[in-house]
Image (cartoon, grey):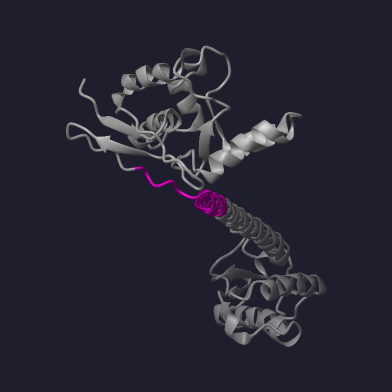
Amino acid sequence: MADKVKVYGKSMKWSAMGIIGAYVKMYPQATLDDLNKAFPRNKILGSDGILLDTIENLQKKAAATTNTDFDDNVIKEAIDKEWLVTLNDGTRVCFYNVMWTKDNFPKIVEHGKLYDIVIADFQEAEKGFGKRGSYTLEYLNGYVPPAPKKRIPIWVWILLAIIIIAVIIILALRGCREQQVVVQEKIVNDTVVIHDTLYVQQIEEIEKNFNAAEFIQGKADLSESAKFVLHDLAKVMQKNPQLRLRLEGHTSAEGDAAFNQKLSEARAQAAVDFLINHESIDASRLEAVGKGSSELKNTDDPMASENRRTEFIVLE
């Protein structure tokens, strides 16, 4: 493969650092671990451990050792002379206590060739106080290094995580509320069903008792039992304001048909008047109809007492 990068260094140190710098340019997302895998210490220096480390790690190691003068000086030199490479995430990396000699320098040069990195004859660093070495890179054969991908700051990830969690919580709460509404609707519906069932049962029971309340022959006066049943009927009507009733008066087949018609009307009206005057039921919810002897309850015995009655029919 054609060479991609040529390193110009002013010393062995700077040429070696230039090789690392070239690798970082070629692989801008490389981490410290990636660098130590790409340039293993045992293949370059013949010893175990790592070839490169961060300035921060070196400072911690220097603080934990008794031989601080040497380590401190190495770190200070790396920082003062900028003898380091800065990774894409801002991590500052330098060699871990490496003194380059004519014996080990060719090994890192040969290793750089694995990545199409070559070394120019290095120039000697400038002498004198305040002078420092450096390296420069030249891209060969039309090679253009990839642009580093912009790293998303950690706070952006944290903010994104918070937003996602908030959305999940909102959706969960909304689901709970919707479920609650469904449950409430079910309870309401069940209550209506129960209420309607009780209402029907009450009406049927009252109707049975009311229809059994007979009238004295030739009279339209309500019996005490009929008044008691009408009182229960009024309670149902008060709890169900939509309820309207038609009360129908009946007679037996005794006597004149015209008299029986008027008597049946009077019996129906007696029940209506009791509900209006004694139970405060609005008159618009009631109507009285006389059937005379046209609808006998006991057809086998037209004169039977059970034919003298008043019945009610639910209109709404």
**Between residues 99 and 210, which one lies in front from this camera angle?**
99
Q: Quadrant of residue 193?
A: bottom right
Side (left or right) of 65 relative to 9: right
**Between residues 91 and 221, which one lies in front from this camera angle?**
91
Taking 249 as reference, is 135 above or below it? above
Q: Is residue 129 magenta?
A: no
Query: Which residue occupies 31% across, 43% down?
Result: 147
The residue positioned farthest toward the right in the image shown: 224
Asked if residue 276 can be seen in this view, the reply is yes
Taking 278 as reference, is 292 above or below it? above
Residue 114, percent from left and from top: 33, 19
Residue 245, percent from left and from top: 59, 74
The residue positioned farthest toward the front in the image shown: 128
**Between residues 116 and 311, which one lies in front from this camera angle?**
116
Taking 90 as reference, is 143 above or below it? above
Q: What range of the chain is rendered magenta?
A: 148-168
Query: Which residue occupies 47% across, 13% down?
Result: 43
Predominant secondary structure in magenta?
helix
Side (left or right) of 29 relative to 224: left
Q: How many marks?
A: 0
Side (left or right) of 297 relative to 110: right
Residue 316, percent from left and from top: 54, 70
